[in-house]
Image: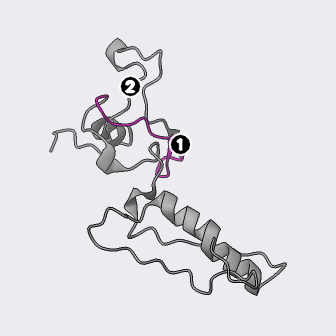
């Protein structure tokens, strides 16, 4: 963090990004900026206080972990290049739902593979019986 001679932090937490220069705003960059710039400003202005920080992720969709359930990363069918995602919750039936087939699954070719959209929706009884 850049500091002034009196050891106070910089006054503003904004950052300029020049278009088409390869300096994209990523989730990692946002966290680093908050820790190195915004938080020191807060601590200087409000010594001894705690803060709660909320970030609107609408313009930074790349800030998700690889295992977070994001449907655009899923295949229609199982396996393939899609990542293994975290377990989720089916609120309609009040049940947890794993996003990968167990290693002892009866259909051997699916053992340990990531589930696809069709499998998830079928399990939740949302896939139409006659298909799309």
Return the mark for residue 70: none
22 falls in the magenta region = no
Q: Callout 2 environment at 10 Å: few (<14), some (14 to 19), or many (20+)?
A: many
- Give the percent coordinates (x, y) of residue 118: 28, 38
Would you place residue 11 above or below residue 99 in this image? below
Residue sticking out furthest to the front: 5
Position of the N terminus, as image quadrant, is bottom right
Would you place residue 128 above or below residue 8 in this image? above
Q: Nearer the viewer, residue 119 or 68?
A: 68
- Give the percent coordinates (x, y) of residue 2: 63, 74
Q: Nearer the viewer, residue 49 or 129?
A: 49
- Give the percent coordinates (x, y) of residue 97: 48, 39
What residue did someone put label 1 on? 95
Front of the two marks 1 and 2 = 2
Return the mark for residue 113: 2
- Give the percent coordinates (x, y) of residue 125: 34, 42
x 38%, y 31%: residue: 114
Way the structure is coloured:
one colour
Q: Secondary structure at mark 2?
A: loop
91 falls in the magenta region = yes
Q: Nearer the viewer, residue 2 or 114?
A: 2
x 28%, y 72%: residue: 19
Discs 1, 2 touching: Cβ within 8 Å:
no
Q: Secondary structure at mark 1?
A: strand
Position of the C terminus, as image quadrant, is top left
Q: Is residue 51 left or right of residue 105?
A: right
Residue interval drawn in magenta: 79-95
């Amino acid at each position: 963090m850049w500091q002034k001679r009196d050891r106070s932090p910089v006054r503003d937490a904004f950052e300029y990004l020049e278009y088409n220069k390869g300096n994209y705003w990523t989730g990692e960059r946002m966290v680093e900026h908050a820790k190195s710039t915004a938080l020191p400003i807060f601590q200087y202005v409000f010594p001894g206080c705690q803060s709660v920080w909320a970030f609107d992720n609408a313009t930074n969709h790349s800030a998700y972990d690889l295992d977070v359930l994001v449907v655009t990363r899923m295949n229609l069918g199982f396996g393939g290049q899609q990542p293994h995602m975290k377990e989720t919750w089916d609120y309609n039936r009040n049940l947890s739902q794993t996003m990968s087939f167990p290693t002892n699954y009866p259909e051997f070719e699916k053992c340990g593979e990531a589930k696809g959209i069709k499998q998830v929706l079928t399990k939740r009884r949302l896939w139409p019986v006659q298909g799309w």
